[in-house]
Image (cartoon, helix red, strand yellow):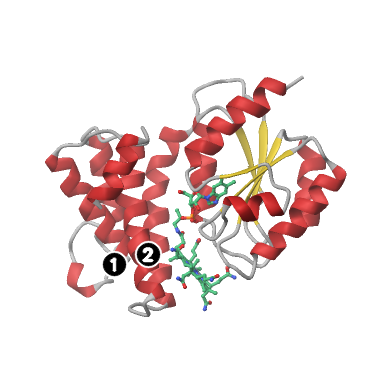
Amino acid sequence: MWLWHERLFRSGCTTRTDKKMDDLFKKIALCVERGKVKAESRYPPELKGQEGADELTKKALDQGSQPRDILNLGLISGMQRVGEKFKNNEIYLPDVLVSAKAMSAAMEHLKPYFKSGEVEHKGQIVMGTVAGDLHDIGKKIVAMFLEGSGWEVIDCGVDVTPQDFILAIRKNNPLAVGMSALLTTTMVNMREAVRTIKSQFPKVKILVGGAPITHKFSQSIGADMTSDHPQEAVEYLENSVSKNKG
Ligand code: B12
């Protein structure tokens, strides 16, 4: 966690935090890791009666923690542990589901902070997780960052087919499309979605992301950018898309 903190601090994605806040972030990370949603949740038995990700996230906000720090040092850090344990067969699918539930409950508190106060949006972005893929936590985080920077996000949800993307583009006329894929088996569907969109809307920029997506893969399928950090998606849109508007 400390290396992760230092990396985020150096990249400007988080602030220096004090010991009390760090302890709270560690507790939030543990709640995501163990799938402790709320104080009243019976699962996991060893955390019975203790506050969950829901209450602790609210507490961290009330105590003045930065929403981005709670997200990076608490929630994402906890979910990374879940990923490692799932990979090593230390936990199973139902455990991952309760972790996702804890993460989503906490994210509800953070959402308003990422929503922009600006009245006029910078433009629209259509977002979705590609066909066959039901993972949506990363996509929702990217959407929160974009909304927080003044973009209007049209979220098409999960399991979005190339045709669904096309319909959403026709309906909304966005400047860019953001796609997420978490499975190596659904990365191929990302290729098809990019090809279909570019053939009909060559000017629409396509941003892709998700744990297995590399720069090399992104380039090979004709996407315009990829990053594993949502802030870089925001910067890309600021630098390339909004300047070329109109
Ligand atoms: C949570 C989770 C689930 C939850 C999803 C809940 C939800 N609502 O999303 C549930 C339990 C449903 C699930 C199901 C499955 N899962 Co799963 N899951 C995970 C887990 C543990 C965490 C994913 C996550 O949310 N990470 C946290 C977020 C914040 O990270 P992220 O999505 O990568 O997003 C960040 C960046 O990538 C980037 N980003 C993301 N999208 C975008 C988009 C753009 C435009 C940009 C710029 C950036 C960007 O920004 C985000 C923030 O930093 C991963 C392990 C892992 N390490 O990824 C496995 C993992 C992805 N799952 C896996 C598997 C195998 C499955 C199942 C097939 C299991 C099964 N046997 O049924 C099913 C598939 C269901 C389906 N059809 O999609 C494997 C995939 C392996 C592979 N080679 O493909 C993984 C890697 C676990 C593993 N190590 O084996 N899973």
Q: Give the residue type that dot 1 points to.
A: Arg
- Tell me: 60 left or right of 242: left
> Which label is found at residue 99?
2
Is residue 37 in view? Answer: no
- Residue occupying image coordinates x 54% and y 42%: 143
Describe the element under mark 1 as helix, strand or loop. helix
- Residue occupying image coordinates x 32% and y 43%: 7
Describe the element under mark 2 as helix, strand or loop. helix
Q: Quadrant of the C terminus?
A: top right
Do the residues bearing badges 1 and 2 touch, measured as CB atoms within 8 Å?
yes
- Residue occupying image coordinates x 42% and y 54%: 104
- Residues 108 and 10: in front is 10
> Which label is found at residue 34?
1
- Residue occupying image coordinates x 66% and y 38%: 125
Labels 1 and 2: the sequence-earlier one = 1
| Residue 120 sits above or below residue 141 on the image | above
Task: Give the quarter of the image for residue 164.
Answer: bottom right
Disc 1 versus disc 2: distance between alpha carbons?
6 Å
| Residue 66 sits above or below residue 42 on the image | above
Give the image location of residue 95, x and y in percent.
37, 73
Label 2 CB-ligand 1 distance < 8 A: yes
